[in-house]
């Protein structure tokens, strides 16, 4: 006769699971839903809100001179300094955001026009390290510098054709960068300025185009024909 089956063990009643404490934000299991952002390598993200405000200050005369010296000593543009045919268009402070490696450095942007090679030089100078951190050489035409504007007016006012066409009380009203629209125009390939003449507060009467490379007037045009 077969042995009786062993009575199955009664299953133990399961204990109720303890509920997790409610989160402070009322959701989840009490753990914060987000963590402070971290940069690569487990480091804390840079705090751009507490950056040094002095980095935005205008360049001092000494800093502007150091920036230009550092640029002209660079081998890529040293020929520009040797020939001496260039104009500094602007020198201004430059600030970059983290995580760029230059963040927190005192930087200067220098834009110059090289007449000897007809090109624009746009550079970022790291004043702390004394190096050219970035350099662009293009055929772009930056705005006229104040020196170029003054030179253009001086050249135009010395031209006999301009003087002979000016009326009583007429003089230079403004100066703007000008480039020719056709290859037949000298200003199509050479950096030039247009000096606008007329009475103070009146309409323009005469336009003189000045070649800034050879410092000469190339065109004299009545304003109504411009």
Image (spheres, rainbow, N blue to C red):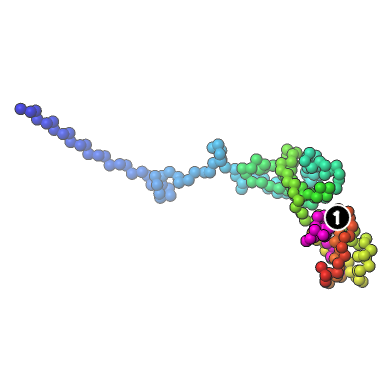
Q: Quadrant of the C terminus?
A: bottom right
Q: Residue at x 22, y 39 (%)?
A: 13
Indicate the position of residue 63 as horizontal and vertical percent values.
78, 44
Magenta segment boundaries in residue numbering: 180-198
Indicate the position of residue 68 as horizontal and vertical percent values.
80, 44
Location of mark 1 (residue) = 212
- Residue 143 can be seen, yes or no: yes
Closest to the observer, 100 or 51: 100
Q: Residue at x 87, y 65 (%)?
A: 220
Residue reaching furthest to the left: 1
Tag 1 secondary structure: loop
Q: Is-magenta flag for residue 115?
A: no
Indicate the position of residue 187 as horizontal and vertical percent values.
82, 58
Q: Is residue 13 left or right of residue 192?
A: left
Q: Residues within 10 Å of mark 1 (few under 14, many from 20)?
A: some
Establish if 151 lies above or below 62. Answer: below
How many labels, in total? 1
The quadrant where residue 46 appears? top right
Closest to the observer, 160 or 99: 160
Q: Is residue 98 left or right of residue 133?
A: left
């Amino acid at each position: 006769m077969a042995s009786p089956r062993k009575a199955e063990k009664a299953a133990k009643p399961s204990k109720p699971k303890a509920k997790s404490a409610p989160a402070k934000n009322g959701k989840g299991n009490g753990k914060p839903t987000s963590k402070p952002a971290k940069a690569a390598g487990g480091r804390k993200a840079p705090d751009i809100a507490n950056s040094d405000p002095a980095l935005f200050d205008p360049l001092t005369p000494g800093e502007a001179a150091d920036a230009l010296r550092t640029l002209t000593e660079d081998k890529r543009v040293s020929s520009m300094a040797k020939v001496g045919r260039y104009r500094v268009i602007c020198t201004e402070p430059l600030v970059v955001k983290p995580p760029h490696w230059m963040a927190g450095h005192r930087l200067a942007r220098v834009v110059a026009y090289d007449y000897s090679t007809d090109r624009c030089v746009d550079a970022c100078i790291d004043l702390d390290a004394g190096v050219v951190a970035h350099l662009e050489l293009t055929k772009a035409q930056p705005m006229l510098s104040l020196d170029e504007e003054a030179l253009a007016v001086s050249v135009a006012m010395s031209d006999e054709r301009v003087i002979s066409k000016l009326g009583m009380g007429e003089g230079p009203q403004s100066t703007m960068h000008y480039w020719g629209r056709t290859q037949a125009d000298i200003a199509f390939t050479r950096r030039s300025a247009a000096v606008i003449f007329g009475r103070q507060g009146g309409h323009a009467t005469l336009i003189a185009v000045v070649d800034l490379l050879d410092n000469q007037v190339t065109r004299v045009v009545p304003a109504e024909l411009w």
